[in-house]
Image: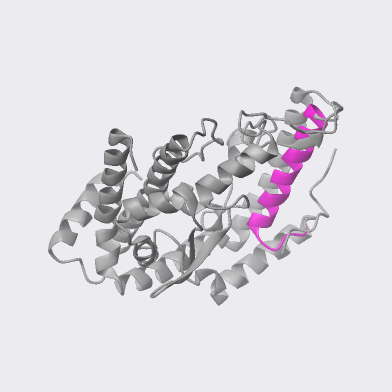
Amino acid sequence: MSDLRGLRGRAALGVPALLAAALLAACAEPPEPIDRATAEAVLADNMASADQVQQALDRVARLCVEHLGFTVHPLAAEYEPDPGLDDLLGPWVYSAPDPSLPPGEIYGLRVDNPNITLMYEGDDGEDVHTEPDPFSELPQADRDAYNEAYYGSPGMEAEIVLLPDVGESERAGGGCMREAEDALADGAYPDYLNHAGLAGARGGTDWERDDRVAEARAAWSDCMNERGYDFEEPMHLRDALFSRSGDLKAAWQIEQSMSLEEAEAALAEEVLAAAGDDAACHAETGLEDVQVEVFWEYLIRYVSGHEEAFYSFHRRAEDMQARAQEILADGLL
C-alpha cells in the first residue's frame, strides 16, 4: 500500500433573511462599518452570483457555436447548487477535515470519479480516455475548430486585461465567448470584472501573506512532519491525495491490477490515516481558526473601502443573467 508519509508536497448559507436585509439596506445606506455576519452573507451571495453569471455566459456561448454548426460540446463545468461559504472559499480557508465522515466525503475524493479522466495510448496508437465523452472522442481537428469558434483560438488563449482597481484579469481572446461577454455586460465586460473584484466575488486580498497565517501553517507543517509527512500546508496534502486517487484509478481502469473495490478500499485507508493526522495537527495549531480570522479581517477591511460595489454587485449579476435569458429565449446572440 502506498503511504503518504515521506512524500514531499508541491511548493473553492443558511442566512437568507440576513442577506435580504443586507441587500435592502444597500438600497438606502450601507452599514458602517460592515459587520462580520453581513459581510459573510453578502460575500456568499456575490460569489454565487458570479458563478451564475459564468454559467449564463457558457450557455450563451454554446448557443453561438451551435449557430456556427457545432453540435457536440465539452462537458459543462459543475457548480454547487446551493453553495455555502465552505464551498465557495474552499479548503484554502476552511481547511480542517472531519475524520468522522465517510472516507469519500472527508476530502471529496474517490477512485470512481467520472469527472476525472485519464488518457492512455490505445492499441491503434490513438489516445483513449477512461471517461469518454462525445467531445473528447472527436478528432483533434474538430476539437480545435470548436475551441477556435468558442474562444477565438484552438489553444483557448485568453486576453490579459488591466483593470483600474484590481489589476490584471483575463477575458476570452475572441470567438463566441467574447461575444457572450460583450452581450451580457453591454459592451463593458472589463468593468464587470473590476466590479466583481471590488465586491470580493473574484480575486482576493493578500490575507495568506499575513505572518499569523504563515506561522500557523508552519506549525501545522511541523506537526505533520513529526507524524512522518512532508507538506508545507494542507492544500499540499490534499493535492497528494488527489494524485493518489488518480494512481489508483489508473491501476483499476488502465493497468487492471486491482478491482474498483480494492482501489476504493486502498484510497479510503489512506484518506482516513491522513485525515486523522491532519485533524490532530489542525487542533494542535489552531490553523483553521487563524485562517478564518485573518481572511475575514482582510476581506472586511477591503470591501469596507468599496461598499457601493460590494452591495450593488448582486443587482448587476442579476441584470446580466436576465440578458442571457432574453438571448436564449430569442435564440439569437
Report x, y in % for residue 243.
73, 45
Q: Position of residue 113 (x, y in %)?
A: 64, 32
Q: Which residues are magenta?
A: 230-253
What secondary structure prevails in the magenta region? helix
Residue 327 found in image quarter: top left
Q: Is residue 63 above or below residue 19?
A: above
Indicate the quadrant where residue 326 lies. Answer: top left
Residue 178 at what x, y percent from top left? 44, 53
Work out whether residue 2 can be spotted.
Answer: yes
**Closer-to-camera residue (113/127):** 127
Taking the spot 66% from the left edge, 67% from the top edge, the residue there is 219
- Total numbered badges shown on the rendered structure: 0
Q: Is residue 204 above or below residue 50?
A: below
Residue at horizontal 83 percent and vertical 30 percent from the top: 122
Q: Position of residue 279 (x, y in %)?
A: 62, 50
Residue 99 in sight here: no
Q: Is 5 positioned to the left or the right of 271 in the image?
A: right
Horizontal arrangement in the rendering, residue 297 relative to residue 111 (left or right): left
45 w.r.t. 141: above or below: below
Q: At x 54% / y 34%, what residue is drawn? A: 73
Q: Is residue 182 left or right of residue 177?
A: left
Any magenta on residue 129?
Answer: no
Q: How is the image coloured?
A: one colour
Q: Quadrant of residue 262?
A: top right
Q: Quadrant of the N terminus?
A: top right
For this orientation, the residue located farthest to the left is 28
Q: Residue extending furthest front?
A: 68
The residue lying toward the viewer, choosing from 260 and 194, is 194
Residue 236 on the magenta span:
yes
| Image quarter in which the C terminus is found | top left
